[in-house]
Image (cartoon, grey):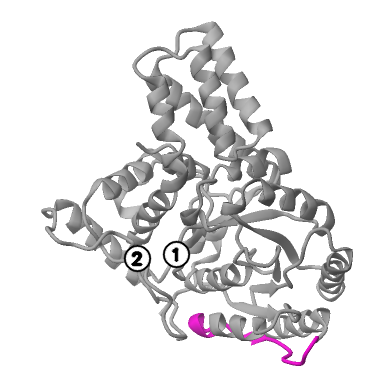
Amino acid sequence: MLERPPEPELEPEPPAAPGLSLLERAAAERAQRQQELLARAIEAPVPEAAPAAGSAAAPAAPAAAADEAAPQLGAFDDTFTWSAEVLAAQGRQLDDISLEEIDWLGRLRRGMEKTRQGFVTQLLDSLGDDPLSPEVLDELETLLLRADVGVQATDQVLEALRERMNREVVDPTEGIRFLKEQLQGLLEAPIRASGATLLAPERGRLNVWLMVGVNGVGKTTTLGKLANLAIRSGYSCLIAAADTFRAAAVQQVQVWGERSGVPVISNPSANADPAAVVFDAIGAAKAKGTDLVLVDTAGRLQTKHNLMEELSKVRRIVDKLAPEAVVQSLLVLDASQGQNGLKQAMAFASAAGLTGVVLTKLDGSSRGGVALAVSSEAGLPIRFIGAGEGIRDLRPFNSFEFVEALLAR
C-alpha cells in the first residue's frame, strides 16, 4: 500500500543532492525492505548466474498495479558498481539508496551506450596520455557535433577548455573531469533559471501538466509513465484524454490509466472537442481534490497554425476554470531525432509556452547529446528522461547522472 509522504518533505528543491527524485518515494515499509536487501547484497558474494540488473521487461497486460515491473537485485557487475559510485559521489548514504535508483542508473548507462560508443571511445583515443592540445580540441569539436550537442553548446565547452589550457597544462584525466563539469553546467543553467531543481506537483494546489509534441515521439506512453510515477509517489492523479484526433488514442490512454489505477476523463465521440475534455477533467479534479491532472494533447507539427491554436485554446480553458492551478507545458522529444528535435523545441517554445522537456528513447539513440542542445539553445530545462519501454523507465532528470552515463568508460 502506497503511503502519501508527509507535507514538509515535498519541497521541490532538496538542498543536498540536486535532481533527487521525490517522485520515486514508495511506501515506507517497501523502502525499508529495499534498503535491507541492498545492505545484505553488498556483503554477499557475487552470484554466478544472476540476471542483469534492471533488464527491461515487455509491457504487461493492463492491470491496476503501481508496483508492476518492480526492480530486482541483479548481478554485482561493473554497472552495479558504477551506479553505486555515482550515487555516492552525490553524497548519498547507504540507508538512503533504494534498489530502484541502482536499477535506473544501470538502465541509463546501458541506454546511453549508442551515444557513448560514438563519443567516449574516440575521445579517449584522441586524448591518449599526453596533455590536451589544439588538435585534441579540434577532434573534440567534431565528436560533440556528431553527438548532436549543438553548435552553441560545443563552442561554449571548447572556449572554456581553451581558456584553461592557456593558463596551465591540462592532462587527460583533468581534461575529462573539466569536460564533465562544463557539460553539467550547460544542463543545469535552465533548471536553475526555472527556480525549481525538481519538477513535482505542489501540495495544496491543483497541478495541470500539458503533454505536447509531434506524433511518434512517445507522448502518450510518457504520460502513462508519469501517471504511474505520480501514484507511486503518493500523489492523486487524473488523466484527460484530449488527443481526440488520432485513432485509438483514447483507448491507449485508458490502458495506461488501468495499469496504474488512474481515472481517465474522455469523450469517445469522433472529433470530440479537446477543450471540452479538459473542461470535464478540470471539473472532476477540483471536485475530488486531485493533486495532478495530466493532459494528453493531439500530436501536431510545429508548423501547423490551426493545431497550435487548438493547444492555445486548451490552455485558455485551464486558465479560466482553474486560475489558481500550477500549469506546466512539457514538450516530449524523441532523442533519436537529434537536431530535428531541437527545431521542434524552438518552435514549440514560442507557440506553446513551454516550461520543460521530457527526453525519450535515449536507449535507441546515438544522439543523446541533443539534451545539451535543448538546454543551451532552446533554454529549456529537461525535467524527465526515458530509457526503456517499461512502465518504470522514466525518471526525473539529474544532470550529474546524465553526464556520468554519457562519459562512462
Q: Is residue 268 magenta?
A: yes
Secondary structure of the residue carrying tag 1 is loop
Tell me what residue is drawn at x 67 percent, y 69 percent. 204
Foreground residue among 131 and 355 = 131
Q: CA distance from mark 2 to mark 1?
A: 8 Å
Highlighted magenta segment, given as a residue range: 258-271
Task: Tell me the kind of residue under disc 1.
Answer: Arg
Q: Is residue 153 left or right of residue 397?
A: right
Of the residues shown, which amino acid type is indicated by label 2?
A: Ala
Q: Magenta region, mostly helix, strand or loop?
A: loop
- Quadrant including the C terminus: top left
The quadrant of the image that shows the N terminus is: bottom left
Question: In the rendered image, which residue does mark 2 sit on?
Answer: 31
Badge 2 or badge 1: first in the primary sequence: 1
Residue that label 1 marks: 25
> Which of 178 and 217 lies nearest the eye of the viewer?
217
